[in-house]
Image: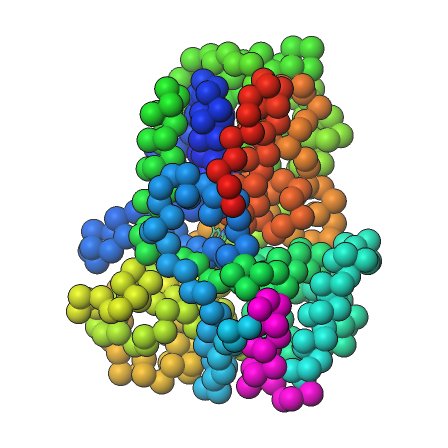
Amino acid sequence: MVGAGFAGLSAAVRLADMGTAVTLVEARPAPGGRAYSFHDVPSGDVVDNGQHLLMGCYTQTLSFLRRLGTIDRLVVIPEVGIEMVAADGRRAVLRSMALPGPLHMGAALLRYRHLEAVERWRLVFGAARLVAMTRRDRAVLERMTVAELMDHLGQGERARRCFWYPLAIAVLNEEPALASAALLGEVVRRAFFGRRRDSSIIYARVGLSELYCEAALAAIKAKGGTVILHCAVERLEVEDATVSGAVLRDGRRLAADYFVLAVPPQSVLRLLPAALAGNRDFARLAELGSSPIVCLHAWFDREITRAPVVGFIDTTVQWMFNKRRIFAPNGGPGRPGYLSFVMSGARSQLEVDNDALVATVLSDLRQVLPASRSARLLRAMPLKEKHATIAVSPASNRLRPATATALSNLFLAGDWIDTGLPPTIESAVETGHRAAAAIGARLGRPRGGYGA
Ligand SMILES: Cc1cc2nc3c(=O)[nH]c(=O)nc-3n(C[C@H](O)[C@H](O)[C@H](O)COP(=O)(O)OP(=O)(O)OC[C@H]3O[C@@H](n4cnc5c(N)ncnc54)[C@H](O)[C@@H]3O)c2cc1C
């Protein structure tokens, strides 16, 4: 197993549970990949590389965390209740009702005060039509961007600004003019038009590494597996369309019956022999681009809001997470306010220097939450993930490969594999479990599911 992000760890744990002898190799000193946390000494806080949200429809991820015994480190908000505030200070709450799904979400949209009554009805019909398209007009949807989809669904400018685009950018990490409509349709179908609990917003009340990394390594080792950290795999050796070994950066060579590359697409290409990188299935991976997420972690002299999450409309910042409330929903022990601001698909912010980024975030915050105007910023820490996810467009969807490859004993895993989902934790874990199931089937081992 190469790579210790969500995909590699979920695959390794499931394979270890099937009784296979697993060796997991990770290039970095610690596991977690694009979803990790670290201890920030000046603040004493645990800081995630970026706020990660799960949803009730993340069945594979929740099953993985249940297996690890860390599911109680999640906070589940069963009724959606998200405050959305515009740059002019107008606010509205997207709040679901205690009705069976999908009526609970229909009720949320019909009471969403950023829109006029007629726009709300159009929004509900648009969402229902989108879900119908995921079943009956998939081919049409596959060709569209989110912006084209909005035209198709007759969604007006305000519905786009106040609902569709904040949602789309958050879940797809891409501009609506480029992003894949089919992936948005899948999210709306699973999260809004499924069971009521599927639309729950879920976040960890601990750092990401404590949520899954430490427990996953312990689970692999407890089953007799081997974990090698801080040592990249440099190349795979291939003979007769079969991987025969993996050569590590320190010169070691590992042999195995099966190999799983749970690494980003560019790493897959680097690990394969040059002759294979020209193979059609692998060559197309080179065309997968990436999209960034820029986060700013900021500590203030006071708590500015009690809301755990606030959506910003018409600003550079898209979402704000109140980490104090997320770590301690009933109020932290009198420590300074700690907010995390997120800008997805934010290519324009990548080259902006840190002072300018802080100034932009503070200006947005002061417009949206007037209570922040008297708060003093104590410290700010920008974290820019240049390759946060693959860039999802109608074209890139066609490039995403399956788990099985042209090499008989090589499998791929990662959020970028073709799952029909955006590149998210759920997509990563789903592919980890798929890779494990494929190997388990070859070995005649039980599937090793943990139940949803
Ligand atoms: C800031 C940010 C916010 C996000 N927010 C959300 C969110 O709210 N909800 C959500 O669902 N998703 C979110 N995501 C996406 C989520 O983090 C990813 O989908 C997920 O972490 C991908 O996991 P993975 O295992 O597929 O890949 P990775 O995490 O990239 O893991 C790949 C691993 O392979 C290792 N590796 C690479 N090459 C080699 C080599 N040659 N040898 C050994 N090891 C190697 C890497 O070091 C890495 O650890 C966010 C991502 C970012 C960056």
Q: Residue at x 30, y 66 (%)?
A: 329
Q: Residue at x 55, y 73 (%)?
A: 99
The image quarter in which residue 186 lies: bottom right
The image quarter in which residue 179 lies: bottom right
Q: Is residue 212 above or below residue 42?
A: above
Task: Give coordinates of residue 371: x percent, y percent.
Answer: 32, 83
> Which residue is outermost to the left?
334
Q: Residue at x 47, y 13 (%)?
A: 254
The image quarter in which residue 217 lies: top left
Residue 356 visible to the viewer = no
Count of labels in the image:
0
Left or right for 286, reference 297: right
Task: Give coordinates of residue 202: x percent, y percent.
Answer: 44, 59
Q: Is residue 299 above or below residue 431?
A: below
Left or right for 342, reference 30: right
In this picture the colour scheme is: rainbow
Nearest the camera: 272 or 319?
319
Q: Is residue 82 above or below residue 18?
A: below
Q: Does the segment drawn in magenta span residue 113? A: yes
Q: Residue at x 26, y 69 (%)?
A: 330
Q: Is residue 96 above or below residue 184?
A: below
Q: Does the segment drawn in magenta span residue 412? A: no
Task: Give coordinates of residue 386: x percent, y percent.
Answer: 50, 50
Nearest the camera: 57 or 229?
57
Left or right for 330, reference 237: left
Residue 417 visible to the viewer = yes
Task: Give coordinates of residue 318: x percent, y percent.
Answer: 49, 69
Q: Which residues are magenta?
A: 100-118
